[in-house]
Image: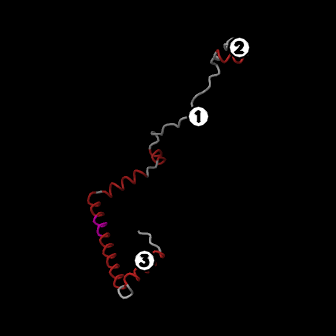
Amino acid sequence: MLDIGWAELLVIGVVALIVVGPKDLPGLFRSVGQFTGRARGMAREFQRSLEQAADETGVKDATKSFKAATRFDLDASLAKNPAVSPSPKPETGTGLKEDKSAPEPAAAKADSTGDDTAAGGS
């Protein structure tokens, strides 16, 4: 919860020993323990009341139905009803095919023949 390790607990204990003193230290730890026990009890009671309110409103039923909906098995559904099938996957690639039968543009013909007059040369 608070992620306090052994090193931190040791530092807290030494500081408490210095500040409070060795005589009153057991009483302090007893008080801290009782406080944490009460706090945990209050948190547990709060959690139980929330769960009870959720049960009364039907939130658990809705949660179960949502979880069931997310576990949808497409293969099993198709096996039960083969008339419904998913749409076919689109072809991979760009979808553009080069047309070899189309005539070559005039500017490209002039460059390939080496004729400078078509390109505006002298």
Which label number is shown at residue 65?
none
Q: Which stretch did the figure color magenta? A: 45-49
Among the 4 quarters of the image, the one containing residue 56: bottom left
Where residue 86 sits: x, y (%)?
48, 39
Give residue 112's position: percent from left, percent from top. Answer: 71, 18
Q: Residue 81 at x, y = what percent?
A: 44, 43
Distance in Å between CA atoms under marks 2 and 3: 91 Å
Q: Which residue sits furthest front?
A: 19
Residue 48 within the segment the image draws in magenta: yes
At 40% from the left edge and 50% from the top edge, which residue is drawn?
69
In space, the residues marked 1 and 3 are separated at their CA atoms by 65 Å
Residue 84 rendering spot, x and y as whole percentages? 45, 39
Q: Which residue is mark 1?
A: 93
According to the picture, the residue beneath numbered tag 2 turns out to be: 116
Name the amino acid, label 2: Asp
Label 2 secondary element: loop
Q: To which residue does mark 3 refer?
A: 12
Q: Residue at x 40, y 53 (%)?
A: 68
| 1 and 3 marks in contact (CB < 8 Å) | no
For label 3, count other residues whose C-alpha is less than 10 Å away and answer few (under 14), some (14-19) or many (20+): few
Task: Determine whether, in the image, residue 100 is placed left or right of residue 89.
Answer: right
